[in-house]
């Protein structure tokens, strides 16, 4: 199969309780719709959740668990081979208090 790389998402912000309740969702870039109709999620809740993904471009967002239609932060993730090893640098999502997009 094609090479896959572990991606870790760090969620940063000043509301620790909120961050612990967030799930990281993703979909292949270009397939994102509002509200999202197809998506997958990273393992675990909160900051530090991870997923092993093939080389592609993704839309990644953090939202309350079970509520993927209301992203609190989002980013574009381009999975490319790291210079060494199999772990790429963490993707950071910044959640501002009261941030609604």
Image (tube, rainbow, N blue to C red):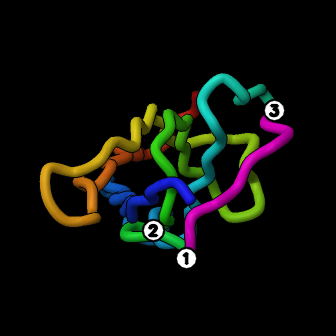
Looking at the image, the residue that sits furthest to the front is: 1
Q: Could you tell me if residue 15 is visible in this image?
A: no
Tag 1 secondary structure: loop
Tag 2 secondary structure: strand
Q: Which residue is mark 1?
A: 44
- Quarter of the image where the N terminus is located: bottom right
Q: Which residue is mark 3?
A: 35
Relative depth, front residue between 22 and 96: 22
Is 13 left, or right, of 99 in this rendering?
left
Mark 3 touches mark 2? (CB < 8 Å)? no
Question: Which x, y percent locates residue 61?
Answer: 55, 44
Is 21 left, or right, of 38 in this rendering?
left
Res. 50 mark: 2
Looking at the image, the residue that sits furthest to the bottom is: 44
Spatial CA distance of label 1 from label 2 is: 8 Å
**Label 1, residues with CA under 10 Å away: few <14, some 14-19, many ≥20:** some
Looking at the image, the residue that sits furthest to the top is: 30
Mark 1 touches mark 2? (CB < 8 Å)? yes
The residue lying at 37 percent from left, 70 percent from top is 48
Relative depth, front residue between 79 and 16: 79
Q: Could you tell me if residue 85 is visible in this image?
A: yes
């Amino acid at each position: 199969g094609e090479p896959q790389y572990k991606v870790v998402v760090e969620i940063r912000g000043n509301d620790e309780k909120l961050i612990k309740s967030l799930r990281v969702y993703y979909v292949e870039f270009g397939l994102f719709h509002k509200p999202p109709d197809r998506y997958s999620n990273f393992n675990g809740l909160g900051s530090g959740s991870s997923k092993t993904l093939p080389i592609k471009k993704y839309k990644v967002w953090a939202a309350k668990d079970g509520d993927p239609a209301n992203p609190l932060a989002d980013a574009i993730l381009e999975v490319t081979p790291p210079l060494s090893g199999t772990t790429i640098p963490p993707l950071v999502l910044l959640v501002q208090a009261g941030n609604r997009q």
